[in-house]
Image (spheres, grey):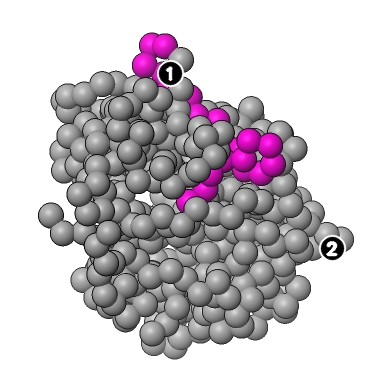
Amino acid sequence: MTAATAHQTAGPYWHMIDFPEWADLLRAGSGNEGVQGERITLMGRITDGEGAPVADGMVEIFQAGPDGKYEDVFHGFGRAATDSDGVFRFTTLKPGPVPGRGNAMQAPHIEIAIFARGLMQHLVTRAYFEGEALNATDPVLTMVEDPARRRTLVAKPQGDGVWRLDIRLQGDGETVFLEV
Amino acid sequence: MSDPIPYRRPDPATQPPLDSPAYGSTHKRHPKQPLLRIPHTLTETSAPRFDASRYPAHADMSQVNGKGALGERIIVAGRITDEDGRPQRGVMVEVWQANASGRYHHPRDQHDAPLDPNFEGRARIFTDDQGNYSFVSVKPGAYPWRNHWNAWRPIHIHFGLHGAGFAQRMITQMYFPGDPLLDLDPIFLSTPDKAARDRLISKFDLEITKPEWALGYRFDMVLRGREATPFEKA
Ligand SMILES: [Fe+2]
């Protein structure tokens, strides 16, 4: 057996592979035209251990469609650059609940991967949606015992279909990152 | 429905730690809390389907509109397998790099080295049924960075891989054999295991080399494999 190749940082010049249209999962040509569902914006601000914005981050999302299925009718991949204030923004459809292990059901969630200068490997977290009944029994959320830490995984509605999840890489309010 | 077979957890020595003190940018960007290890679900074992019709391939970085880029033309080729040696087909490979002078076609790169109008420095390819990929480029140049006094990155090409599971997603860098900067580079050196580090160094390959045209380098990559036995039911 050969161990998996070592990760290396995406560095400061990853924008060479930034295609800003990828932040809109509903764009013409995405393959998602005509998929029925609740249109949402997922946005947030990424900050570092000093609270400074991470202005050179690459954020990828992967999610199920409104039907709770991966890559069936909905192509659930997006990529966005953080702006000078550390903010990322995606346009997508709200995912449905996804089967977990055993008989568990996972609450609707969007997997988030963060790449940047200074990240030797990408960081993975999830955005859940505040107010979902399934959050109370979700297998990942219930692994986080501290309610304050659990809240770092739950996006809050801002009105007009906008959901916000700020991400803190280090320190006060540090986001729960997942080892996947 | 049966549970998905999880991916194997990496041996930490074979991966660079998030807290790599010699690389200054990690200081304020690494989480201090331990990562939460979660059992793999469909979210981790599924992956985006990158249809080549929507994500068109582009395998030749050595020219723009038929005009050749400056520098030493190279072919980079290799095979992508998983940890059990199984070829990984249909992997979308994203590539980006500096030009032969060590300058990125990127507005934030202010290094005082010339841009090349015939070099953009990005490619996208897909592995074939045997897990093979290849692309054409020019050998990138070394460039300075401000991590420490007189710091220079060894010449490298950035690779992004999209496998069959989102848990296999990874970004890495390919280096070149014999580069004296490797032994001084905190990013390259951050991976503790020497064998794992050395696998990031491509090999000159005469079989990939094309006479009168381009030097060939081989760079094989390995994605995470699956656990041998299914995760026991809760
Ligand atoms: Fe680079």
Position of residue A34 relative to residue B77, above or below, is: above
Q: Secondary structure at mark 1?
A: strand
Circle 1: residue type: Pro
| Residue at the extreme top | A160
Circle 2 crowding by C-alpha within 10 Å: few under 14, some 14–19, many from 20:
few
Circle 2: residue type: Asn
Residue B194 placement, left or right of A134: right
Residue wearing tag 2: B150
Q: Nearer the viewer, mark 1 or mark 2?
A: 1
Circle 1 crowding by C-alpha within 10 Å: few under 14, some 14–19, many from 20:
some
- Does residue B84 appear anywhere in the picture? yes
Q: Nearer the viewer, residue A142 or B154?
A: A142
- Assign the magenta stretch its main secondary structure: loop
Residue B192 placement, left or right of A113: right
- Give yes or no for contact between labels 1 and 2 (Cβ–Cβ under 8 Å): no
Which stretch appears magenta? Answer: A159-178
Q: x%, y% of residue A169? A: 62, 43
Position of residue A71 relative to residue A127, above or below, is: below
Position of residue B181 relative to residue A50, above or below, is: below
